[in-house]
Image (cartoon, helix red, strand yellow):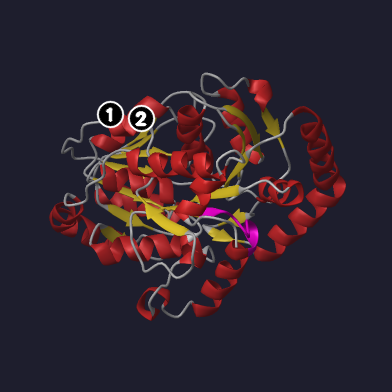
Amino acid sequence: MARILYGVAGEGMGHAVRARVVLEHLARRHEVQVVASGRAHAYLAARAPEGISAEQVRRIWGMSIVYRDNGVRNLRTFAANVRGGLLGGVPHNLRTYLALTRSFQPDVVISDFETWSGLFARVRGVPCISLDNNQVLDRCRHDPAIVGRDRLAYLVARALVRAKVPGCLHYLVSTFFHPPVARPRTSLHPPVLRPCVLAARAEAGEHLLVYQTTTENRALLDALRRSGRECRIYGLRRDLAAEVREGSLRFRPFDEASFVDDLRTARGVISGGSFTLMSEAIYLGKPMLSVPVRRQFEQILNARYLDRLGYGVAVDEVTPQILAGFEERLPDLARAVSGHAQDGNAELLGRLDALIAAARPEAPEEGEALGERRA
């Protein structure tokens, strides 16, 4: 049994959803403490897997992104993080560090794109394993056609990702696309999927599943209304206690079971460039119309690879014409995405187990045999 500190980024719920699956696996055989920021902390504290109490999920401060009209507001993001860090975030994180060092001495740190846990590992001299989807930006090579005219945005995003959790023992990259690996101590693995998604059985329905993280997308709603197709919409109205119908549009409050059922029976999916939902849609064979957040290159990259594989269509916005074109292409897109195959979470979790075993101090020869010592 190892003592593991697991850090989870709070920006974007995909990190928390993936972490819960991995934590459920780890808690069966290891002692685990969790640190998480933002919405990830609330999610994991309320849904802590068996073997991890809510008290073992500690809240830390982490940077956040300010969005408006499906785009990142760079200056407001910078100002909000400087203000939040100076007014309480950094002092709180320092207090958490001191408290944790007195009560818990981890053998291994695992970071899901979370900086505080990576810093903890470096300061304490503890091996750190990175497990996320974001590192594909830095640790793989992307051809010019994928980067397109966004080379500056790509270089900035790559530099930010590289600085997020440097010097890890190994980088486990969760991905549905497979560009060439460009850096050492890196391996690509299928996405981590929730048990409810793995257990779902896809059926061919007629509705579109729509998921939006922004509540200000009137152009999208206009295009959906004009299509006349039933659309089951999540995220646009977050205050709902029950479903609200407006013609062919059904605004639904978020419920995991209902959401997965609507996903498995959908004809297609309309969403941003979120890696988690994209991976779940691909697993269930559902084509996606992806509208990545502007100036969020990681989402843009996901959408472009989705388009290249023929699993969906990447667009800058949804208009009635674009939506009609997507619907016309649905049969061909469905045939392409049906060829995707994944054996659950076995591959990534198996590699993680091997890395944890190799990283423990009492097994140095295993780490040397795997060639996974920190550079």
Q: Is residue 331 left or right of residue 356?
A: left
Is residue 293 highlighted in magenta?
A: no
Looking at the picture, how far across and down is residue 368, in whole percent? 51, 53
Highlighted magenta segment, given as a residue range: 163-170
Looking at the picture, how far across and down is residue 29, in whole percent? 50, 25
Looking at the picture, how far across and down is residue 325, in whole percent? 22, 62
Q: Residue at x 48, y 57 (%)?
A: 371
Three-letter code for the amino acid on which mark 1 is drawn: Ala
Viewer-nearest residue: 273 or 320: 273
Q: Residue at x 79, y 42 (%)?
A: 93
Viewer-nearest residue: 39 or 356: 356
Q: Is residue 126 left or right of residue 87?
A: left
- Give the residue at mark 2: 195
Most common secondary structure along the magenta stretch: loop
Q: Is residue 143 left or right of residue 167?
A: left
Q: Distance of mark 1 from mark 2, alpha carbons?
A: 6 Å
- Give the residue at mark 1: 199
Give residue 82's quadrant in the image: bottom right
Q: Residue at x 46, y 61 (%)?
A: 136
Three-letter code for the amino acid on which mark 2 is drawn: Pro
Q: Residue at x 37, y 38 (%)?
A: 193
Taking 258 as reference, is 235 above or below it? below
What crowding class fits label 1: few (fewer than 14 Cα within 10 Å), some (14-19), or many (20 or more)? few
